[in-house]
Amino acid sequence: MGGAYMEWEYNFSKRVLNRGFNYYLDGYVENIYINAKKIKAVVYGTHRYHVEIALNGDNIKEMSCDCPYALDGHNCKHMAAVLFEWERRVSHPEIANSEIIDDASDDDIRSFLLQLFNENPELAERFNQFISKENSMDAMTSELFTIINHYQYAHKYINIDNTVPFCEDYEKCVFKWFDLLEQKEEYINAIRFLTEAYSILDSLDIDEDEQQPYALSYYINEAFSYLLPYLNISERKEIFEFLRHQFYSMKNYSFKIDLVETLLSRFMGDEYVKFQLDFVEEQYDYFGKYPTVFNREFMINSVVNDYLELLEKNNASKKELKDVYKKYWKYDSVRMSCVKECMYDKNYDQALKYLDKCIKLDYKDQSLYKRDVEMKKDIYKKQGNREGYREMIKILVLDFRDAGMEEYIDNMK
């Protein structure tokens, strides 16, 4: 193989390169298209991500992927996986692994494995773990703590010099066990181990150089979602509650961001809507502490709307739907959803009644109060209610000095 094909590896950190290699080995790269100027592929993992790579001869010109990590300006594992697949295709012909094994005798396989194990002790350990009947949580977490103890100094602190190597070793250990449990189809155990690894990482006092701990937590969190399709509905509900309680105990709000994304976006289906609504309602005040991170109004509106759609799908009565609006009326986005639905149905009288209720709650917030008055003004205009329209103009002039005096005088005639 020419050296040019290997140079692309320098575009990736060791951690990302290793994860990309695992994705490549696991066959996640599909629908790959290669010509002299471009590589395009779909990489399946937690989600389906699209990768495009522009070539200049054998050199990489530019790369893109629609995963969050790449959109944040990084070269991601999905890009690396595609490049490993590209490298293999330009240097080796297609050979089916199963055909190789079928053509080999038992003695050949044993002899080859023995040679591999002698040359690569890690493979021997991995094979032994794979055929083991029991991989206890204690044994797996004990290995994580061995890594932690190696890098911690006094006061249980991992300093800036050790952050990167610690994260690399921790990730390697986590995904060694994760891959093993996945291969053995022990999905519940895999999720419980990921949760434990996540919790341990969250508890550490660690220098966040180059956001390495956050990137590590992102990969662990992403792995939760990857396993969900393998679980039945009752198991997924159990895992939702498990992760929900995990959120309560976490201290790192950056880690919490990813967990919220998992709980609200990765658990898809009617069976989760009520759980998601309860979760957002419970955490509404917490989300308000980080307005630049959590758009809590968007979240509550989204899950309430999902819940209302679920009720409608199940032929809920108008009273049940009204009760939901009443229960969540304190949330501005829910109130506005209710008002806009009335306006869409041209039920203007009901919309005005709702806006009067909104004004009672929004009066102390000048921007919301002004919005409510302007909406009433627009409705009165649609109805041709000159008196109501004039009253709203008056409020805008006197309370907000918003309408021009000329418009005010014209409407007072």
Image (spheres, rainbow, N blue to C red):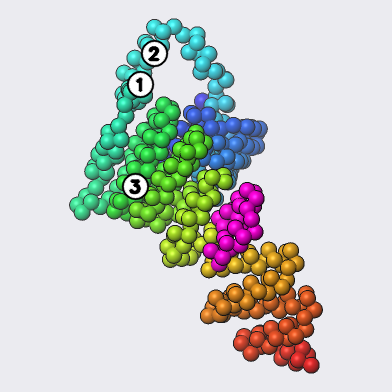
Q: Is residue 406 visible?
A: no
What amino acid type should be assigned to the residue bearing mark 3? Ser
In this view of the protein, which residue sits in the foreground, 213 or 269?
A: 269
Q: Secondary structure at mark 3?
A: helix
Where does the image place residue 150, in percent across and percent down from the top left? Answer: 24, 42
Left or right relative to 409: residue 41: left
Q: Secondary structure at mark 1?
A: helix
Query: Pointer 1 and pointer 2: residues touching (CB < 8 Å)?
Result: no
On the image, numbered disc 2 is attached to which residue? 112
On the image, numbered disc 3 is attached to which residue? 199
On the image, numbered disc 1 is attached to which residue? 131
Identified at 41% across, 11% down, the residue is 109
> Magenta stretch: dominant SS?
helix
Which residue range is magenta in the image?
A: 302-329
Identified at 36% across, 33% down, the residue is 177
Residue 347 position by quadrant = bottom right
Of mark 2 and mark 3, the one earlier in the sequence is 2
Residue 301 position by quadrant = bottom right
What amino acid type should be assigned to the residue bearing mark 1? Ile
Q: Residues within 10 Å of mark 3 (few under 14, many from 20)?
A: some
Of mark 1 and mark 2, the one earlier in the sequence is 2
Task: Say if the magenta span includes residue 233.
Answer: no
Q: Is residue 49 visible?
A: yes
Identified at 57% across, 39% down, the residue is 48
Where does the image place residue 370, in percent across and percent down from the top left? Answer: 62, 79
Residue 338 position by quadrant = bottom right
Against 49, is 317 above or below? below
